[in-house]
């Protein structure tokens, strides 16, 4: 009798434990079996697309983000103009340095204490996953933590997807959010999205030759009847000679600037597609993220000076709707 009571008690304990573990206890023809509960489907996250920064990424349902899809947080976000904003639960940045230098910067002992670091792959691309704590010697206060994926992107600046937490706070689910968000990262071509075929073909041809730094071939792509490359009038030797002399005197290849421009978002003035997007924007209205996009072609000092002048005065390139490249010039 005691044995029967003990067996019944044991069955009761197993039944309670099984139900508590989330399984389903099924009786079949006098036999017992445990069938694992089917996993509940995970609700898809909404996606935020940034034409300016050239990517889209998913973020937790109910979270808030800024207009450039760079900062995400459970609480509403206001990004002050012209500020080095940080502190959102999830942040996405287009770095303005090489992948190796970004990773090296996160390991700088003066600014960070390394907690963990390993090589991973994100959607087939090489990446570094690092967790660091600020020493207080740089931008972040002492104890501020970053859990950052630095994704290597061919022919483009690396992208950093990171979770953050303030000193003394816990991570909560922020690391898991970063893990899932980075897997959803999709790259776009902000300089070529939505172009008419004739414009897209000309842009692609210019971009390929600019990357090769072939001045003569680049000059041959310019419109023979209408092409502006300097406001000082035609120069001896034409555009190729002018670009080569500019590279010699400034130390910067105009071809590199042109390639950077054509990978930025564009704007449109009547029948002309113009790179960059800032061409017809008041420089004072540019967000910090937009200023970072322009970093390959304009310094912070230049952007500040143009903001005072009230108009963009930097390098720009224009292709007509019928595929004629009619200007690549800087100044007013």
Image: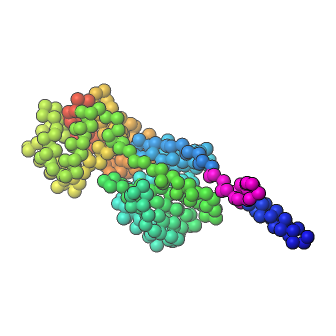
Displayed quadrant of residue 218: top left
Q: As rendered, which of 223 and 176 lies closer to the eye?
A: 176
Tell me: residue 112, above or below residue 309.
below
Query: Where does residue 147 sit, x and y in percent of width and height?
Result: 52, 62
The residue depicted at 38 percent of the width and 51 percent of the height is 300
Displayed quadrant of residue 175: bottom right
The residue depicted at 42 percent of the width and 48 percent of the height is 186
For the question of whether residue 226 can be seen, the reply is yes
Q: Which colour scheme is used?
A: rainbow
Query: Where does residue 265 sit, x and y in percent of width and height?
Result: 36, 41
The residue depicted at 91 percent of the width and 70 percent of the height is 1
For the question of whether residue 276 can be seen, the reply is no
Query: Where does residue 321 sit, x and y in percent of width and height?
Result: 26, 29
Query: Where does residue 137 sit, x and y in percent of width and height?
Result: 50, 68
163 displayed left or right of 191? right
Specify the quadrant that holds the C terminus: top left
Task: Identify the residue at the far right of this view.
Answer: 1
Start-end of magenta stretch: 21-39
Residue 33 belongs to magenta span: yes
């Amino acid at each position: 009798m005691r044995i029967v009571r003990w067996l019944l008690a044991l069955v009761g304990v197993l039944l309670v434990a099984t139900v508590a573990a989330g399984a389903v206890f099924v009786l079949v023809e006098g036999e017992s079996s445990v069938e694992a509960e089917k996993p509940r489907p995970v609700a898809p996250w909404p996606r935020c697309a940034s034409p300016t920064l050239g990517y889209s990424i998913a973020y937790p349902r109910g979270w808030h983000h800024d207009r450039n899809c760079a900062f995400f947080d459970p609480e509403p976000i206001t990004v002050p103009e012209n500020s080095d904003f940080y502190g959102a639960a999830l942040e996405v940045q287009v770095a303005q340095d090489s992948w190796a230098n970004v990773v090296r910067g996160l390991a700088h002992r003066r600014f960070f204490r390394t907690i963990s670091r390993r090589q991973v792959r994100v959607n087939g691309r090489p990446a570094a996953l690092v967790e660091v704590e600020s020493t207080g010697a740089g931008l972040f206060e002492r104890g501020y933590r970053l859990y950052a994926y630095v994704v290597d992107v061919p022919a483009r600046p690396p992208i950093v997807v990171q979770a953050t937490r303030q000193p003394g706070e816990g991570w909560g689910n922020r690391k898991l959010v970063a893990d899932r968000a980075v897997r959803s990262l999709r790259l776009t071509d902000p300089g070529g999205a939505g172009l008419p075929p004739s414009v897209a073909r000309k842009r692609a041809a210019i971009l390929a030759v600019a990357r090769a730094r072939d001045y003569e071939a680049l000059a041959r792509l310019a419109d023979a009847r209408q092409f502006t490359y300097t406001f000082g009038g035609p120069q001896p030797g034409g555009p190729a000679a002018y670009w080569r002399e500019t590279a010699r005197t400034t130390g910067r290849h105009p071809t590199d600037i042109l390639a950077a421009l054509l990978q930025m978002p564009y704007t449109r003035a009547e029948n002309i597609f113009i790179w960059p997007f800032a061409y017809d924007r008041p420089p004072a209205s540019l967000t910090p993220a937009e200023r970072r996009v322009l970093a390959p072609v304009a310094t912070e000092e230049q952007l500040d000076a143009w903001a005072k002048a009230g108009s963009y005065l930097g390098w720009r390139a224009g292709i007509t709707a019928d595929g004629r490249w009619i200007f690549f010039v800087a100044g007013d």
